[in-house]
Image (cartoon, rainbow, N blue to C red):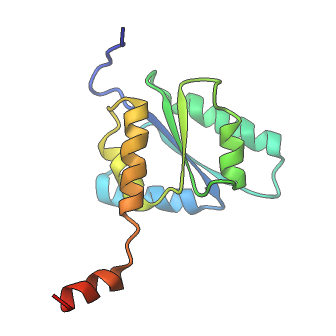
Protein backbone atom coordinates (compact mmCIF):
# COMPACT_ATOMS: atom_id res chain seq x y z
CA UNK A 1 0.00 0.00 0.00
CA UNK A 2 1.47 3.36 -0.98
CA UNK A 3 1.27 6.48 1.08
CA UNK A 4 -0.24 9.56 -0.53
CA UNK A 5 1.11 13.01 0.12
CA UNK A 6 -0.33 16.45 -0.46
CA UNK A 7 0.67 17.80 -3.88
CA UNK A 8 2.71 20.58 -2.29
CA UNK A 9 4.97 18.10 -0.47
CA UNK A 10 8.33 18.01 -2.24
CA UNK A 11 11.19 15.58 -2.39
CA UNK A 12 14.04 17.25 -0.49
CA UNK A 13 17.22 18.04 -2.40
CA UNK A 14 20.79 18.30 -1.12
CA UNK A 15 23.53 19.19 -3.59
CA UNK A 16 26.91 17.95 -2.36
CA UNK A 17 29.91 19.00 -4.45
CA UNK A 18 33.55 19.95 -4.43
CA UNK A 19 34.02 23.62 -3.46
CA UNK A 20 31.12 25.92 -4.34
CA UNK A 21 30.00 24.19 -7.54
CA UNK A 22 26.67 23.12 -6.01
CA UNK A 23 25.89 26.58 -4.66
CA UNK A 24 26.58 28.10 -8.09
CA UNK A 25 24.32 25.53 -9.78
CA UNK A 26 21.53 26.23 -7.30
CA UNK A 27 21.91 29.97 -7.88
CA UNK A 28 21.66 29.52 -11.66
CA UNK A 29 18.64 27.21 -11.35
CA UNK A 30 16.85 29.65 -9.07
CA UNK A 31 17.36 32.46 -11.61
CA UNK A 32 15.44 30.28 -14.07
CA UNK A 33 12.84 28.63 -11.79
CA UNK A 34 12.64 30.84 -8.71
CA UNK A 35 13.57 30.17 -5.10
CA UNK A 36 13.45 26.47 -4.23
CA UNK A 37 12.19 25.29 -0.85
CA UNK A 38 13.68 22.25 0.89
CA UNK A 39 16.96 22.49 -1.00
CA UNK A 40 20.43 22.89 0.52
CA UNK A 41 24.00 22.72 -0.70
CA UNK A 42 27.09 21.32 0.96
CA UNK A 43 30.57 22.28 -0.22
CA UNK A 44 33.12 19.57 0.47
CA UNK A 45 36.43 21.10 1.51
CA UNK A 46 39.56 18.96 1.86
CA UNK A 47 40.55 20.97 4.93
CA UNK A 48 37.44 19.93 6.89
CA UNK A 49 37.30 16.72 8.89
CA UNK A 50 35.46 13.92 7.05
CA UNK A 51 33.20 13.07 9.99
CA UNK A 52 32.30 16.76 10.35
CA UNK A 53 31.33 16.92 6.67
CA UNK A 54 29.21 13.76 6.94
CA UNK A 55 27.43 15.33 9.92
CA UNK A 56 26.74 18.48 7.88
CA UNK A 57 25.32 16.39 5.01
CA UNK A 58 23.18 14.38 7.45
CA UNK A 59 21.85 17.59 9.03
CA UNK A 60 21.00 19.06 5.63
CA UNK A 61 19.16 15.85 4.67
CA UNK A 62 17.12 16.09 7.87
CA UNK A 63 16.41 19.80 7.21
CA UNK A 64 15.00 19.25 3.71
CA UNK A 65 13.07 16.00 4.25
CA UNK A 66 9.35 16.77 4.14
CA UNK A 67 8.55 13.08 4.64
CA UNK A 68 8.80 11.92 1.02
CA UNK A 69 12.54 11.34 0.90
CA UNK A 70 15.62 13.19 -0.23
CA UNK A 71 17.59 13.21 -3.46
CA UNK A 72 21.28 13.91 -2.94
CA UNK A 73 22.95 15.23 -6.09
CA UNK A 74 26.74 15.00 -6.29
CA UNK A 75 29.26 16.14 -8.86
CA UNK A 76 31.04 12.90 -9.80
CA UNK A 77 30.96 9.21 -9.04
CA UNK A 78 33.96 8.14 -6.98
CA UNK A 79 34.61 11.63 -5.65
CA UNK A 80 34.61 12.55 -1.98
CA UNK A 81 31.18 14.27 -2.09
CA UNK A 82 29.63 11.08 -3.48
CA UNK A 83 31.48 8.76 -1.15
CA UNK A 84 30.44 10.76 1.90
CA UNK A 85 26.84 10.91 0.69
CA UNK A 86 26.75 7.17 0.04
CA UNK A 87 27.50 6.61 3.71
CA UNK A 88 23.93 7.81 4.41
CA UNK A 89 22.22 5.25 2.18
CA UNK A 90 20.04 3.02 4.30
CA UNK A 91 19.71 5.56 7.11
CA UNK A 92 16.52 7.07 5.63
CA UNK A 93 14.55 7.25 2.37
CA UNK A 94 17.10 8.78 0.02
CA UNK A 95 18.89 8.32 -3.27
CA UNK A 96 22.30 9.54 -4.43
CA UNK A 97 22.60 10.65 -8.06
CA UNK A 98 25.98 11.68 -9.47
CA UNK A 99 27.01 13.99 -12.31
CA UNK A 100 24.81 16.92 -11.36
CA UNK A 101 24.46 19.56 -14.06
CA UNK A 102 22.01 22.38 -14.72
CA UNK A 103 19.61 20.40 -16.96
CA UNK A 104 19.43 17.69 -14.27
CA UNK A 105 18.77 20.21 -11.53
CA UNK A 106 16.05 21.97 -13.54
CA UNK A 107 14.32 18.63 -14.12
CA UNK A 108 14.47 17.86 -10.40
CA UNK A 109 12.95 21.22 -9.51
CA UNK A 110 10.18 20.75 -12.06
CA UNK A 111 9.23 17.26 -10.86
CA UNK A 112 9.71 17.24 -7.08
CA UNK A 113 6.27 15.81 -6.33
CA UNK A 114 7.14 12.54 -8.14
CA UNK A 115 8.10 9.44 -6.19
CA UNK A 116 11.79 9.52 -5.27
CA UNK A 117 12.82 6.58 -7.45
CA UNK A 118 11.00 8.02 -10.48
CA UNK A 119 12.46 11.49 -9.88
CA UNK A 120 15.98 10.04 -9.77
CA UNK A 121 15.43 8.28 -13.11
CA UNK A 122 13.98 11.41 -14.74
CA UNK A 123 16.83 13.54 -13.40
CA UNK A 124 19.46 11.08 -14.63
CA UNK A 125 17.91 11.11 -18.11
CA UNK A 126 17.74 14.92 -18.21
CA UNK A 127 21.34 15.23 -17.07
CA UNK A 128 22.51 12.91 -19.83
CA UNK A 129 20.45 14.67 -22.49
CA UNK A 130 21.97 17.96 -21.39
CA UNK A 131 25.40 16.80 -22.54
CA UNK A 132 25.60 17.64 -26.22
CA UNK A 133 28.44 18.10 -28.66
CA UNK A 134 26.95 21.24 -30.21
CA UNK A 135 29.33 21.40 -33.16
CA UNK A 136 28.32 17.90 -34.21
CA UNK A 137 24.65 18.91 -34.26
CA UNK A 138 25.38 22.08 -36.22
CA UNK A 139 27.54 20.23 -38.75
CA UNK A 140 24.79 17.65 -39.33
CA UNK A 141 22.28 20.49 -39.99
CA UNK A 142 24.65 22.09 -42.54
CA UNK A 143 25.13 18.75 -44.31
CA UNK A 144 21.37 18.15 -44.71
Q: Residue furthest left?
A: 144
Q: Quadrant of the N terminus?
A: top left
Quadrant hosting residue 27: bottom left
Q: Residue furthest front?
A: 144
Is residue 84 shown to the viewer in this render? yes
Q: Nearer the viewer, residue 70 or 41?
A: 70
Q: Nearer the viewer, residue 86 or 112?
A: 86
Residue 16 position, x and y percent, is 60, 49
Q: Nearer the viewer, residue 73 or 41?
A: 73
Q: Give the residue displayed 41% in from the left and 57% down from the top.
A: 127
Residue 139 position, x and y percent, is 27, 89
Q: Give the residue displayed 66% in from the left and 39% down from the top.
A: 86
In this view, 105 is above or below 118: below
Image-based side of 80 in relation to 5, left or right: right
Is residue 35 shown to the viewer in this render? no
Quadrant hosting residue 77: bottom right
Image-based side of 59 in relation to 117, left or right: right
Q: Give the residue displayed 40% in from the left and 48% down from the top.
A: 123
Residue 66 position, x and y percent, is 45, 25
Residue 20 position, x and y percent, is 61, 61
Q: How many marks?
A: 0
Q: Give the residue displayed 40% in from the left and 42% down from the top.
A: 121
Q: Residue furthest bottom?
A: 142
Image-based side of 18 in relation to 124, left or right: right
Q: Quadrant of the C terminus?
A: bottom left
Amino acid sequence: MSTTFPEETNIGVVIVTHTNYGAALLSAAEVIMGKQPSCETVSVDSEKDVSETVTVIKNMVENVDEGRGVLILTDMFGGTPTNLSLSLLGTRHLEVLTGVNLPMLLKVFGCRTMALDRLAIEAKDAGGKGIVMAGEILRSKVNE
